[in-house]
Image (cartoon, rainbow, N blue to C red):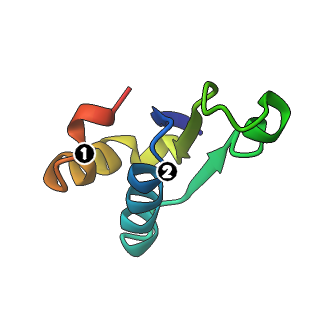
Amino acid sequence: MIELIRTNDMVVLSFAEALLKDAGIGCAVVDQNMSIMEGSLGVLPSRLLVDGARESEARQLMDDADLGYSLR
């Protein structure tokens, strides 16, 4: 799995995850529960990971959806 996005913006994360799932690209959101440990301050970002074999396709999908600014 390759890190595609790292953000504190849950709307961007949710939108990106939905786009990837609709395109049939395997993905996983990690570090979402870290906010519980930090006291819900939003300091620690969540990460969106994608299947490494489809990374370029996932990046193109994010660019097409105007989410290119959030790519790692």
Locate residue 65 relative to residue 13 in the image: left or right. left
Seen as rendered, the residue at the extreme right is 37
Residue designated by label 1: 67
* Location of residue 18 in the rendering, given as x and y in whole percent from the top left corner: 43, 67
Quarter of the view holding residue 65: bottom left
Which residue type carries mark 2? Answer: Met
Count the labels in the image: 2
Position of the C terminus by quadrant: top left
Task: Give me the residue at 77% from left, 45% from top.
Answer: 33
The local secondary structure at tag 1 comes to: loop
Which residue type carries mark 1? Answer: Leu
The local secondary structure at tag 2 comes to: helix
Q: Mark 1 or mark 2, which is nearer to you?
A: 2
Return the residue nearer the eye: 54 or 14.
14
* Location of residue 32 in the rendering, given as x and y in whole percent from the top left corner: 69, 45
Locate residue 45 relative to residue 11 in the image: left or right. right
Residue designated by label 2: 10
Task: Give me the residue at 59% from left, 39% from top.
Answer: 1
Seen as rendered, the residue at the extreme bottom is 22
Mark 1 vs mark 2: which is more N-terminal?
2
Q: Is residue 31 above or below residue 62?
A: above
Q: Is residue 44 above or below residue 10?
A: above
Quarter of the view holding residue 63: top left
Return the residue nearer the eye: 29 or 12.
12
* Location of residue 36 in the rendering, given as x and y in whole percent from the top left corner: 81, 41
Q: CA distance from mark 1 to mark 2?
A: 13 Å
Task: Give me the residue at 61% from left, 33% from top.
Answer: 42
